[in-house]
Amino acid sequence: MYGFINLCVRALVLDKFDDKTWEKIRAKAGVEDSFITHGCYDDTITMQLVQAASDISGLQVPVILELFGEFFFSFCQSSGYDEMLRALGGNLKSFLENLDSLHSYLSFSYEQMEAPSFRCERRHDNALILHYYSHRKGLHPIVVGIVRAVAKEFFESELKMEILEESHEEERNGKKEHVTFAIYQKRIRKIDEGPPTFVAQTRKHSEQQLNKEDDTEVQAVLRSIEEQKESGTKPLNHLHRSQKIQSLVSLGNLYGNFHPSFPEKLWMTQDVFCEYFPYHLVFNSELNVLQAGVHIQRIMPRLRSLESHPVDSFFDLIHPQIDWTIKSIQKFENMQFVLQTRRAMITDGWGSDQPMLQLRGQMVWMDSLDAMVYICSPRVASLKELEARNLHLSDIPFHDVTRDLILFNHQRLAEIELGKQLEQKKEELRSALQDLETEKKKTDMLLHSMLPRLVADQLREGKKVEAGEYEMVTILFSDIVSFTNICAKCRPIDIVNMLNALYIRFDKLTTVHDVYKVETIGDAYMVVGGLPIPIKSHADRVANMALGMMVASSEVISPVSREPLGIRIGIHSGPAVAGVVGEKMPRYCLFGDTVNTASRMESHGVPYKIHISSTTYQCLKEQEFRFEDRGEIVIKGKGMMRTHFLEGNNSATMEEIMGTYVEKEVEDDSSRSSTPEKTDKTKTPPDTPPGRYNTRPIGKFNFGDDLNVIPMYYPDNDKNRTPYRDAKPPSAAKSSTRASASSSTERASEERSKCPVFRELAEAESKRSEEIEGARPSRSAGATASPRRMRNRISNHRESKTCILL
């Protein structure tokens, strides 16, 4: 099919749906959106688009095809074919009968077009029987949509169409599908048509007005005749001669009394007829050629003799594809016939590489002579084709419009070729723009990983970024426990791989909590919340980030001890100054005493613990975080400071903090509610691939490189970001009463066992082993560390709205 059809499919989807739906259909069909009007494409591409549209919309393929047929008609009108379509016929039957002629004309522009064929006949109950023939199977619903649209737009009618028969036509050599429709037409009356939509409608309204005026004139003549009869005078005597003729013609047209007269003999000799109609054939019911035009005789010398030669030995019947029988030809008398000369019968001067001559014209059966006459002309579309067949314009008679058609179409083909080249350039430009947009996104992603989005956009616009003072931000520092010993005992490449695996997980957590990663120096990781856009929840975000970092670090294995890495974290809140430093490799840096104090919180911290200052504690104490008071300690350069350890968050689950949360749909259909609030809770968060993020027990998150994350909900989230979930009221936290079952003789394992995070992980793993061995877990009210209950509490957010994180 030509690209015109695929462009119509795209226009239909964009008209009925939107751009996103078209992109889904195109992606599902696996085709590129680069169709050219006069470009040829495989039929499977169109059918893949139709099937994809059916799958996405939920409509059956026949319904899609019928909808496409209705839209295809209006698409052709808007593409410049409106007047051409309106001129095909004055009623539905003549319109359908002349569609083949239109397809024959369009084949000059669309040379590889395989158009369907149509044949009409009247049934005894006045139903219109439409025969549809096509090379392609299963496309007959398109015909239903087109015919209904034509009847409604052109003939103000409603149709009822029934399929009487659907089979393969053997007389068409089994190559085409034959579907027979019964059409019942009912005229509708429009109350207010409004202004014309297309140019041809203006002509239609003018013709209706002229017909109305003619009817008025005829009625006036009839009234005048009746009045003169009553007065006893002869009708029309008082009128002028020209007025009498006009009145009689009007009456004749009204009553349909026109009867043509024919001469007793044909006043034309045989030689004149054959010379001035140089392209014609006459053959009898046995298909023997009786007469041929002079130009056909010149091309085929054997036809000069008067001996009987079968017409099928000289010509192949190209269109319609039927057998060479009088009965078959009579069925398609209202269609255009295309014959092609056979190379074996053509003159010797015709080169072997020259294309065969094709003739197009009409077949008319003459009962009195028991013969068929074929009046035709050469089927050529341009001067180039005319020359390739050893023909000239002088070989075509003056009365044949083929002369004008060749000259006109030659110029039109040049315009079509120019338009095709412009379309190709347009598609190349559009493809280049898409590639440019893709590269721009990659560049933006890289730039935003180095600088905050707001700062990066200002630099890209050429603006100078002034340093800003922030009254309150929260800064986090972290480092790896025993990092110096690890570096001394393994290869540098192992250190790089370990840090890369760890920092990839930390970077994903910055996306979950929308905080800014300032920099990494060796094993030190620095994060800040509350800039460059000040937000109230800066401390909450950094605190949750720290809790997630503790769990994420346990997934990375030390290349020396082959055990999970341990980290220490320090957090402090206070004022800071931030700005862009440098031009060649600009960096967004923080300055102020808050940075030094946060670093001291990390350096004076405890392995596997989150050490926070009293300022950060004041920002978090109103929230549902859990703390352990460390008391007053000496901080280098600061003196005595009262600090705390952050242990957990009672108002969020582990999946929420890690950005891997998804609420599964309720299994029991009877428990589902139709209220919007409950319905939303059973769905995956927006823009999240379904089935990608499943809830897992603590310690089994597999927070790897190929895992995307879901932003966590905060009341002051950026509106451009997708909220994680609706805010939920905090509930009382449950504390574990079970002691850690893990034991180790190494110092690192002993320190790890003191950390609440790893203590709860160990409890879950220990109880899971006991359950496998058949041990019955305790079901007391305070036994919150039961593995089954913990797994259900963490994996299924519906059963428990809070979770002991640390």
Image (cartoon, grey):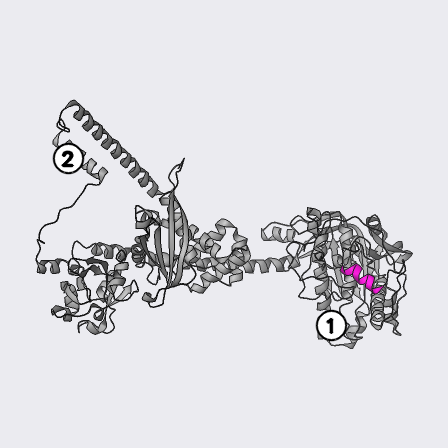
Give the quarter of the image for residue 635.
bottom right
Q: Which quadrant of the figure contains the N terminus?
A: bottom left
Secondary structure beneath label 1: helix
Give the quarter of the image for residue 34.
bottom left
Q: How busy is the neighbourhood of tag 1: few (under 14 within 10 Å), some, or many (20 plus)?
A: some
Inspect the image, locate mark 2, and give the three-letter code of the amino acid beneath it: Ile
Residue under pointer 1: 495
Q: At x 12% / y 70%, what residue is drawn?
A: 307
Q: Which residues are magenta?
A: 785-796
Which residue is at the front of the view, 701 or 512? 701
Q: Position of residue 319 (x, y in %)?
A: 29, 63
Secondary structure beneath label 2: helix
Q: Position of residue 268 (x, y in %)?
A: 9, 55
Is 175 rendered above or below residue 669? below
Residue under pointer 2: 245
Q: Which quadrant of the figure contains the C terminus?
A: bottom right
Q: Position of residue 217 (x, y in %)?
A: 23, 31
Q: How busy is the neighbourhood of tag 2: few (under 14 within 10 Å), some, or many (20 plus)?
A: few
Q: Position of residue 245 (x, y in %)?
A: 15, 35
Q: Is residue 638 visible?
A: no
